[in-house]
Every structure is written in structure tokens, then in C-alpha cells.
Image (cartoon, rainbow, N blue to C red):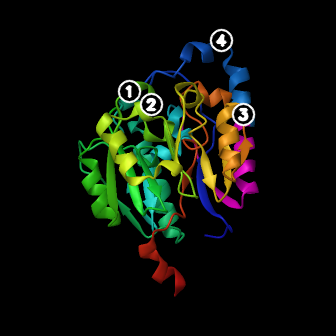
Amino acid sequence: MSGSAGTVVMTAPDHYEVCYTINPWMRPEAWSRDPAALKAEAGREWTALAQALAATGLDVEVVPAAPGLPDMVFPANAAVVLDRRVLLARFRHPERRGEEPRFKAFFESLAVRGLVDEIHLLPEGVFQEGAGDCIWDANRQIFWAAHGPRSSLASHRHIARTFRQKVVSLELVTERFYHLDTCFCALSGGEIVYWPPALSPESQALVEALVPPAQRIEATAAEAGTFSLNAVNVGRELIMTAPPTRLRRELEARGYRCRIVDLSSFLLSGGASYCMTLRLDLASALAQPRAAE
């Protein structure tokens, strides 16, 4: 990977639109009022996000978009990537299943270029929607993996087997927060920003057992509803859609710099900066010896 901070995948917004509803946030009726203006706005917002990522030192790899697959613009759901291994997603909703061969071909092209080493598939009928439901916590060397609206609990054993890492299973209990990345963000300093009611009581207890109180930042329902938890963290930088004042001050008090990017047109589909990206460079402690050779 050539960038000083790593490499991130984005999908060109050429075919982005909001034309169906598979989560409670999606508003095709709002999109249909002025699709030309919103498409132009989406292009500007996508470019601003790419520029913000580049400003942190990340390289951006762009996946070509495909007609009829508007949610390809959210590549966080395409795969789980760690230590140059890729576990490709299986989507629960038919509307997104056409993305699977497109992303498979893209990762195969990365393998040819030497950017990833292994590509793994999930069994038929086992749903898992990529990094959106499987968040790597480098401080604790664990995956926080969700099951519920989109991903199957059965997928977690495949994640553990593929990456040889511990998986902590969290149950999402509301369709409103349909992927873990909509309500849960693991930060470089060890903090977890999350909205606890999105998780079952048992899952809340797991988070409390593994994360000390001083490192738990509990968002309010209103804060989670802005999609500001759906953020990209690079070192002490946080690239996010506009967070409410209290949350922003809390993050800044802990030493994070919030880079604010307007993603209003993508919020109409229920996604923000984390959804729109996929890190290729994440590495565990297991990979360190090879990296040092």
C-alpha cells in the first residue's frame, strides 16, 4: 500500500440514486422530487469525502459503478478485510445481490496487483454484510460483529476462521440501526462511541465488560440519528457528517479532530462516510512479523 496512512476503497457515484427502500432511512420519494439536482449534489459530496480522506494521507481506490446497483456506493458492505485477506459479503436483500460479482471481480483485480493475498467466500445462505457489520478494534485485537437485520450469527464463525481472530457477537435489535456501523464506532485511542439501545441487553453487557467506562462514549438517540457515528477514523482524525455540538466537543476534548463533510444526499439512503469507504490496509498483531521482514 503506498499511502502513508493506508488505502481506502470508494465506489464512483455515477449510478447512485434512491429508488427502493430496504431500511427505514431510505427516502425514494425525496429523491424523486429533483433527481438531477440530487445526483449532482451527490457527486460534489462524494468528491469532498474523497478529498477529506486524501488529506489524512489515505490513498483512494475507486470501484467502477454499475447501472441498477445504486448501493454499490457503500463499499463498506462489500467485504471484511484484514491482514490482506478478504471475506466477501453475501447480501440479505435481493436489491443488493447484484453487487456481489462486481465486488468479487474488483478484489480479484486487487489480488493481481498484489494489494490483497486471499479472497474467501461465505457459504450459500449465510448472510454477512461486510465491514458495516464487522468492525475491527485494533486496540483490543477483536472484531465487533453484528447479527440481526442484515447479517447472520452463523457468519461469525466463518469470520473467526478466516482471519484467526476473536469475534465478539453483538445483536442489533432495531431495523433503524440495521448495520453496526450506524450506531457503533471504534476509535484509535480505544474509545467506543455507540448508542446502547441499538444493542440487546446481553450485547450491551458485553461491551461494558470489554470496554472500561472511561472509554465508553454513549451517544444519544438524536446524535445516532444524524449518522455522525458512521465515521472514518484515521489516527486522531475523524471524517464524519455534521455531529451535534455535544458529541463533537466530547470527541475534541479527547484529542480527535473532526473533519466535517456534508453527505446529505447519501443520508437519504441511510449511509454516511464509513458506509462509503472500505479500508484495505487494516492489520492485526498477527501480521506484524511479516510486515517487519
Contact (Cβ within 8 Å) of mark 1 with mark 4: no
Mark sitting earlier along the chain (2/3): 2
Residue that appears at 52% across and 40% down: 72
- 179, above or below 51, in the image: above
Contact (Cβ within 8 Å) of mark 1 with mark 2: yes
Tell me the residue that label 3 is attached to: 262
The label on residue 174 is 1
The CA span between labels 4 and 3 is 20 Å
Could one spot residue 63 in this view of the protein? no
196 to the left or right of 164:
right
Query: x, y percentage for residue 272?
Result: 59, 36
- 166, above or below 20, in the image: below
Mark sitting earlier along the chain (3/1): 1
Q: Which residues are magenta?
A: 45-67
283 or 33, nearer to the observer: 283
The residue furthest bottom is: 293
The CA span between labels 2 and 4 is 26 Å
Tell me the residue that label 4 is attached to: 33
In reply to whether residue 61 is colored magenta, the answer given is yes
Residue that appears at 46% across and 83% down: 289
- When asked about the image quadrant of residue 189, the answer is bottom right
Image label count: 4
Find numbered disc 2 in the image and state the secondary structure of the residue it sits on.
helix
Name the amino acid, label 1: Thr
